[in-house]
Image (cartoon, rainbow, N blue to C red):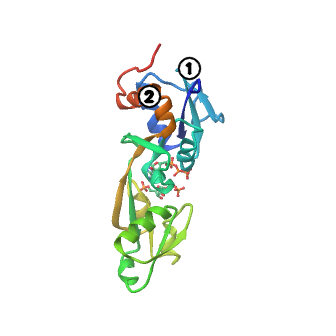
Amino acid sequence: MSEQLTLALSKGRILEATLPRLAAAGITPTVDPESSRQLIIGTSRPDLRLLVLRATDVPTFVAYGAADLGVAGKDVLLEHGGRDLYEPLDLGIAGCRMAIAGCPGALAAAQHRPLRVATKFEAIARDHFARRGRQIEIVKLYGSMELAPIVGLADVIVDLVDTGNTLAANGLETFETIQSISARLVVNKAAQKLDNARVRELIAAFEAPDQTVGAP
Ligand code: ATP
Ligand code: PRP
């Protein structure tokens, strides 16, 4: 069992929503993770440190045990596959939805051929359309997905939608919501078994954000 528990977080939306939850449990980082270039950050709890990662890398660090716990969007977890991870808690933060969108009329226009789908969420898109029995071709992108239908690169996109402003600003409409997305606490399966008391205590800290847990 290691000296410290390690919690993996990502800058941006996840960190912004997670820090208040930690603060409510009496846990504060020793430096501001948003502005600091430090990638390993101590906390007010000597037995807890933070790793600051790319959002998509959080499940990998936790699955390999480089971090005991992590906070990641359900989208990222579905793409990763979730092997070697427990997902004990829906934190209800960083909420949005995974949706199929495109230019008006795009689905009807493609009904007699494979649908060309631009996305960075390849596993989610493949799984969804396979369930529907709909043949697709994936165009893998890493950002600015909304451009793809406009310039004829794809019929539709599978992407995250929050306010809907990006779709509206680009003249796109939602055809279907695949599922609601929120951030989840994930735990390495071995850490959950070997370090059960401390891991459970930290899960409880996230569950009961109004209480100071684990303070000396
Ligand atoms: P990466 O650095 O790997 O590209 P990212 O920039 O998408 O990740 P964030 O923007 O911080 O990282 O998003 C982290 C998580 O926040 C997403 O995985 C998703 O679950 C959630 N989220 C909530 N609203 C949105 C949104 N409008 N766009 C993207 N992600 C959102
Ligand atoms: C995300 C997502 C959409 C947009 C949705 O992009 O990919 O483009 O936010 O949010 P909205 O419905 O509130 O407009 P992000 O800003 O993370 O940039 P990205 O293209 O780098 O993923």
Q: Secondary structure at mark 1?
A: loop
Q: Is mark 2 within 8 Å of ligand 1?
A: no
Task: Residue 172: tell me if it is visible.
Answer: no
Q: Quadrant of residue 107?
A: bottom left
Give the residue at mark 2. 202
Please state which of residues 103 and 178 is positioned toward the viewer in this rendering. 178
Name the one closer to the observer, 146 or 54: 54
Image location of residue 146, percent across then percent down = 48, 66
Query: Image point 39% across, 66% down: which residue?
Result: 128
Task: Find the distance from the CA under tag 2 to the CA under tag 1.
Answer: 13 Å
Query: In the picture provided, is 185 more to the left or to the right than 36?
Result: left
Q: Which residue is mark 1?
A: 46
Which label's residue is closer to the chain start, 2 or 1? Answer: 1
* Residue most extreme to the bottom: 112
Residue 13 located left or right of residue 1: left
Q: Cβ–Cβ below 8 Å for labels 2 and 1?
A: no
Q: x, y (%) of residue 80?
A: 51, 54
Relative height, residue 216 to residue 55 (above, below): above
**Three-letter code, disc 1:** Pro
Instruction: Kindly identify the amino acid type of the residue bearing the numbered disc 2.
Output: Leu
Nearer the observer, 187 or 183: 187
Reply above or below: 78 against 117. Answer: above
